[in-house]
Image (cartoon, rainbow, N blue to C red):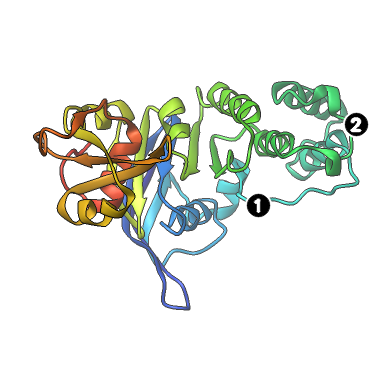
Amino acid sequence: MRLIISNLSKTYSNGVRALKNLSLDISTGLFGLLGPNGAGKSSLMRTIATLQEADEGAIFLDDLDVLKNKESVRRILGYLPQEFGVYPKMSALDLLDHVAVMKGVVNRGERKDLVEGLLRQTNLHDVRKKKLGGYSGGMKQRFGIAMALVGDPKLIIVDEPTAGLDPTERNRFLNLLASIGENVIVILSTHIVDDVRELCTRMAIIHQGEVLAEGNPQSAIDAINGKVWKKVIPKEELEGYQSSYKTLSTHLVAGKTEVRVFSDARPDASFQPVEADLEDFYFLKINHGGQNGTSH
């Protein structure tokens, strides 16, 4: 399957231009949508999910016109928004059964098999009768995926799914996403670079409603390898370095400030070469626009 987004634009009534002629080509598998908060990721997700109108542009899922055939899209869509409500006094078993009825699974035996299978797939079967109000954050996210998977969707959208999860729950959730992303399109919208690096074979970086880069995460890293340098500096000198060099990021290391910069050659002898990572590429695009190191 392919999801083709062409020249999509959206301006809200308060004048904020959330999407600016945005175009993407997304195929089967896990696709990472990276960007800071306010980049337009949620606006794009909500538009694809038929929850808001676009001002201009087109979206096609194979031959299906997403913007004109909303009901048809909703039948093959699984959507896990950043914030989603559950009925805290209902059990996972009962609520998932209710969702299946709403999705048109009316045969009781078929529905029972579907619900049980999804609860096993999301590793929630042992707590299926527990009230959702007692679920941890990670358990709620996995239940959200179970709800999104009802109806055998062809397109799954997850918006900031690992924010706030502890490392164990995050790994469990990412493994779950990887397992379901083999035969359908899964769009993972996040500001967490490691989620995309670990999971996705394709990605796009968006900022201020525009695509700054699109391609393979490893190719993005390869494009800037040998051009990232680090140096430990006194904190009070940071502003000077930021104005003199193409600064990517700063980190505190043992109480001292380590600065990472992008440069085709070693800036001076005091800088050490460092292995580039996807976060370096991300900050290059976000902080310095489309300069250098494009990915394909």
Residue at position x 41%, y 51% in the image? 59
Residue type marked 1: Glu
Q: What residue did someone put label 1 on?
A: 83
Residue 218, quarter of picture: top left
Task: Say which element carries label 2.
Answer: loop
Nearer to us in this view, 23 or 238: 238
| Location of residue 9 with respect to 274 vertically, above or below | below
What is the spatial separation of the Cα atoms under label 2 and label 1, in whole angstroms?
23 Å
Q: In this view, does 236 lie to the left or right of 196?
A: left
Residue 106 position in % (x across, y down): 82, 36
Residue at position x 47%, y 40% in the image? 192
Nearer to us in this view, 216 or 113: 216
Quarter of the picture containing the C terminus is top left
Task: Say which element carries label 1.
Answer: loop
Q: Note whether residue 289 is visible.
A: no
Q: Note whether residue 275 is visible.
A: yes
Residue type marked 2: Lys
Q: What residue did someone put label 2 on?
A: 129
| Location of residue 112 with respect to 59 vertically, above or below | above
Sequence-earlier tag: 2 or 1: 1
Residue at position x 35%, y 37% in the image? 279
Quarter of the picture containing the N terminus is top left
Residue 75, quarter of picture: top right
Q: In this view, does 281 lie to the left or right of 13?
A: left
Indicate which disc residue 197 carries: none
